[in-house]
Image: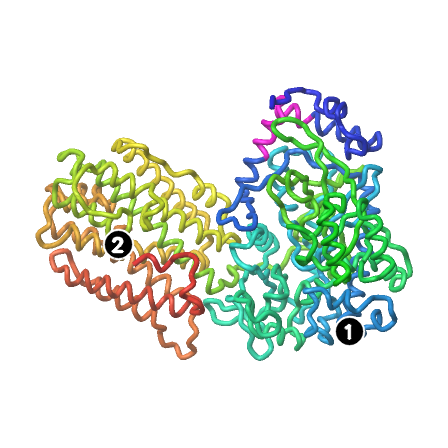
Amino acid sequence: METDISLNWADAYLAAAPAGDLFAGAAPAMQDRWRAMLDRLSAQAQGNPAMLADNVARQAIDLGMAFRLTGDEQERSWPLGPIPMLIDAGEWAHIEQGLAQRAELLEQVIGDIYGAGSLVRDGKLPASVITGSSNYWRVMTSTPPPRGHHLHFYAADIGRGPAGEWRVLADRVRTPVGVGYALENRLALSRATGDLLGAMNTRRLAPFFDDLRRGLAADCERSDPRIGLLTPGRFNQSYAEQAHLARYLGLLLVEGEDLIVTDGQLFVRTIQGLKRIDGLWRWMDSRFMDPLAFDSKSRIGVPDLFDACARGGLVLSNWPGAGVIESRAFAAFLPQLSKALLGADLILPNIATWWCGQSEERAYVRERLDRLVVGSAFDQDVAGLPDARFMPGSALDERQRATLAEAMARRPMDYVGQEVVKLSTTPAVVDGRLTPLPFTLRVFVARDAQGQWRVMPGAFARLAGHGDIRAALMGKGDMSADMCVVDSQPVPPDTLLGGGAPAIRRIGGMLPAKAADNLYWLGRYIERTEMTLRLIRAIVGGSIEADLGPSVASPTMNRLVGQLVLWGAIARDGGGPVGPLCATALGDARQSGSVRALMASVGNIGEGLRDRLASDFWRLVRLPLPTFDGAVTETLLDASSRMIERISALSGLAAENMGRTEGWRFHDMGRRMERAINGCRLLGLFGGDGASADDLTVLLDLNDSQISYRTRYLTGPALPPVRDLVALEPHNPRAIVYQAQRLADHIAALPTLRADGMPEEPKRLADALVARLSPLTGDMLTIADINDVENRLLGLSDAIGQRYFLQVRKAEKADGADLLS
């Protein structure tokens, strides 16, 4: 399709926009704002919508925005549209009132379901509407939450009809997917468009997140509570969103295995021991939270978490079992419940819903099937709906209609009928052209510190591509957009500081044991990647290859290739051209020790640290690796050198940007440990008693110590001074003793669990290692000494893991950290 290049986007769009479009159907004043926005975007993109879309996409990538579809192993780039949606503050005020009312209604309904039970007893709500839901948990009955708040956070999917009316399509209280993406959408669009949003008087999102954080803290027992964000893990579809929110809000990102319940209180395992958790913002379904109280098959929950809830010492957002109100069956009763509990009609109505568990409603659905959507009342697979949980009745053929009628006769309570909703459209860029797409908004509501409901002045906008616009998650072909509430007056700046700055602290915060584990192995994998690259470069570009030609023809070259075999970078050790072997070691993902595989491990481990790693880290990790169609040694040399530069950039980020906290210490310890172990192995390989000049030259190259040696000695490489430089020189950052001293320094600075002043095992071993190396010189050092040092390093690494890292389910480490040896 040809790119639409026009400076007047507004007129071109309006000429083809459908009736009821958000832009085309806006009031004259709002149309002027749309025009002004599109004119500025057009000027910025030189009239080319595709250029604007590319710019916004780059910003999304730079921010690390990503998601997964069900079944995906790798993350996808976030599909952010470049055209924001504009809604007038006056229209938004109506939505705010309606959603605040609805949140309060749902709070009262949930409280009654798990409390007094008067709604069922008085006939206002059928019992089967409650018990039919898989999200109803009887165990939560008579287990009130702190301060009586079952809900702290609520989201509603709303749609706008062509006539401008808004309706609630679905209620979401289990997992608030989308709120982080709404924030990231705003950040990406702001970076791509400069001061455009501010010039339009766009309301800011920061005050809402401040209210959310303060509302969670207000229900906790302690005045300065510790709050975590409970994630199902890095393979969850919205893990990137969860990590971003934890970082933005200053919450501790934790998984089930990070947590333990002791004496009815929840604790997180940290390198300092167990630390109490006062509250959790959970992004995990109730079913998986506690295998002892809910689903015994769960492997990601926290045993006895229910006990901590029942004793009243833990705030959970939202309270387990709240998801019972998400079923479509509930939508049929909320209008009447609003009148009964709030004494008022719903400000924002539902889409009309008929629950087939009632005879009149069931007959109504049967008679008007062609004009309704028929679906599962409790969002479960049901008979009679082929490959779907809801679909238009008009799409069913005669056989399917008969099957559905028979199924509804057997279990009518499993079905609902809902009106067919026509959605308004909004401008979007598709294939380089401005195109109207139907949209829904997921709007978020949070309880503030005073217990009042606050609505985020923005939303997660989802534009329908090929996916199901009524589904809970993004589908293939869908697009997101920023939704802006625009005011008539300039909006004052806001930040998460809220009413004032917090008390000054100079501590780095707690480091969970699992995060320490990941940071340590992240350092080890980065260091192994660098050394593998140095081996490749020594083979294809070192002085040995230049003298011998491109074949494995010397003992030194054989040892270089053999080390790649030992590290799993290549599958075999044999003669022949070095090019294909090094191309495999660099780019063959099937070899577990290849640079490509190692960088994949770096990325996998990094995903578990998303809340702790800057976006610059992801840009470097995600840069494409070179591929090779032939064995061209010059290309291999250039590629390996560029990759070493990339690794150096990662090292520079850690050296210059990471605060000197415990997290940095574990990351640096991983690099030091891997460098020291590799140093021992390479010294044994190339610095043995019968080492040749070629061996020693390669050893100096691999340890980046050639210049230091030449500056210090006027003769060629000799065994004792080379050994001294690469093993025992305390001022050489590549020397083994240097790594040992840094390891000892880091361990000495870490917290201890002992109260008697005695050293813990890692400190004792690290100090002994330094003492073992310090008295030696190059002419005293033997290969037996080197082997002893390597064994001591391996023992120290094990001791670090035993003391500081999680010791549960070690055999299931997804990071593959135990592959390094």
Q: Quadrant of the C terminus?
A: bottom left
Front label number (1 vs 2): 1
Residue at x-position 75% and y-position 22%: 11
Task: Identify the mark nearer the N-term, 1 or 2.
Answer: 1
> Is 43 covered by the magenta stretch?
yes
Residue type, label 2: Asn
Say which element carries label 1: loop
Instruction: Locate residue 531 relative to residue 135 in the image: left or right.
Output: left
Check the image and report above or below for 124 versus 488.
below
- Which of the pair 14/680 is nearer the observer? 14
- Residue 226 visible to an observer of this rendering: yes
Instruction: Name the residue rendered at 88%, 71% in the picture.
Output: 122
Q: In the visual, does 606 lie left or right of 123? A: left
Residue 697 visible in image: no
Residue at left offset 77%, top offset 73%: 115
Q: Which residue is mark 2?
A: 678
Position in image of residue 619 (x %, y %): 47, 41
Q: Position of residue 25 (x, y in %)?
A: 82, 32
Which secondary structure class fits the magenta region best? helix
Residue neighbourhood size for the residue with mark 1, other residues' Cα within 10 Å, grouped as few (<14), some (14–19), many (≥20):
some
> Residue beneath label 1, please?
115
Task: Tell me the kind of residue under disc 1.
Answer: Gly
* Residue range (magenta): 40-56
* Distance Cα–Cα, label 1 vs label 2: 63 Å
Q: Nearer the viewer, residue 795 or 139?
A: 139
| Residue 662: image tag | none
Residue 782 located left or right of residue 226: left
